[in-house]
Image (cartoon, rainbow, N blue to C red):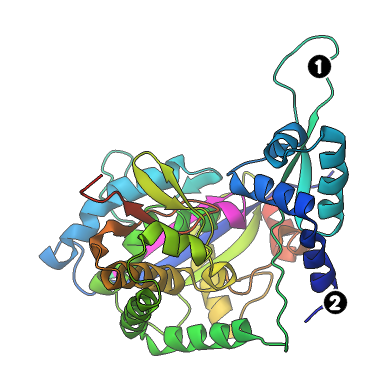
Amino acid sequence: MRIHDLEALALLHDPVRRSLYDAVTAGAGDVGRGEAAEAAGVSRTLAGHHLDKLVEAGLLESGFRQQEKKGPGSGRPAKVYRRARAERSVSLPPRDYAALASVLAGVVDVLGAEEQAEEAARRAGERMAGRHSGQPVERVLGERGYEPYEEGGLLRLRNCPFHALSEEQPLLVCSMNLALCQGLLQGLGDDPARATLDPRPGECCVVLSKTNGD
Amino acid sequence: MLNVMHLAQLNIAHLRAPIDSTELAEFVALLEPINAIADEAPGFVWRLKESETDPTATVVHDYGDHLLVNFSVWESLDTLWNYAYRSAHLGVLRRRREWFQRTMEPYMVMWWVPEGYIPSLAEAMARLEYLKAHGPSSEAFTFKDSYGSSEAVSLPAAAEARK
């Protein structure tokens, strides 16, 4: 465990900072100070103070957005915030599953064992469903960190829980992730064919179609 | 002034059957839509085409039968990565075993070129050979072991290309 990770995460103990962090990370794009303040129910000044603290700690990144209105007095670009790319994790006692997962993913690649890996992921998804029986898949995916949201009649997933690995072995990890989501649907008594791949930059590669009942 | 560098990439695939066989028909049918996504993708600069009019025509070359070459230039590693793995191209890649032989040798190589320079296929094949012989370096690398464009600027090969 790295001490600066612990310190950064400890900043989120403050309820105002926590709701500001949630307000910024809930959206797809950049979030302005005013927007975040409104979502958190605090003043712009207070929001700005806490948002900048979160930037200092490396939990958020800031940038500037040109104002839409043109003309005198509107030239100052607005400060905007987005989630930092860097990952933070704290484990007590210290654990490092990512390093081992990376080695194992490399082994699957060398063996050409993608099909077996996908099958194993499908079974893991089914087992996962056992702990969430009766819950809608949206909620389970939400609890597992996928950050589901609706767009164009599809359920898209804003966050890839396997991000670092998916950059290393995209083909293997995205295929396993799809199989895992399909297994999860199956295990929940839902239709596994709802989950398909529709990758786009910066998000999880899996999308879910709406259920027939919708 | 800083020279803008672009990323050249070559990947090769050994076909399981002749390109005009029924086994490869689905792959050939995917060439047009998937190349169209590449051509429209952010950061796409250039790709080697056999024909301007027939989108299903694969590149004809002297490097052996059943060898499919895919050779292109991009603005950056990120733009190429997003096309390869964050577009409908990923779905085609997932089906590669249906059409291509599995190989333990490197089948993809990247290197930096000065903006505006289009390398020849011979140079691209030489880069792949270099990668096979020496492992990843700033002169020939992979996504797994990639090198930034700043590391390529001082290379003799890059200087040669600017002459």
- x 51%, y 54%: residue: A203
Can you identify the residue that label 2 sits on? A3
Q: Which residues are magenta?
A: B67-79
Left or right, residue B162 beside residue A120: right
Disc 1: CA contacts within 10 A as few (<14), some (14-19) or many (>=20): few
Is B154 inside the magenta-drawn segment? no
Q: Which mark is residue A74?
A: 1
Residue drawn 56% across the image and 82% down it:
A102
B69 is within the stretch colored magenta: yes
State whether residue A121 is above or below residue B109. below
For the point 63% across and 74% down, the residue is B145
Residue A156 horizontal/vertical position (percent): 43, 51
Tell me if residue B33 comes above or below residue A141 in the rendering. above
Please state, as top left, top right, bottom left or bottom right, where the N terminus of chain A lies in the image. Answer: bottom right
Disc 2 residue crowd, few under 14, some 14–19, many 20+, Cα 10 Å: few
Tell which of B75 and B68 is nearer to you. Answer: B75
The residue sitting at the left extreme is B22
Give SS at disc 1: loop
* Mark in front: 2 vs 1: 2
Residue A128 falls left or right of residue A168:
left
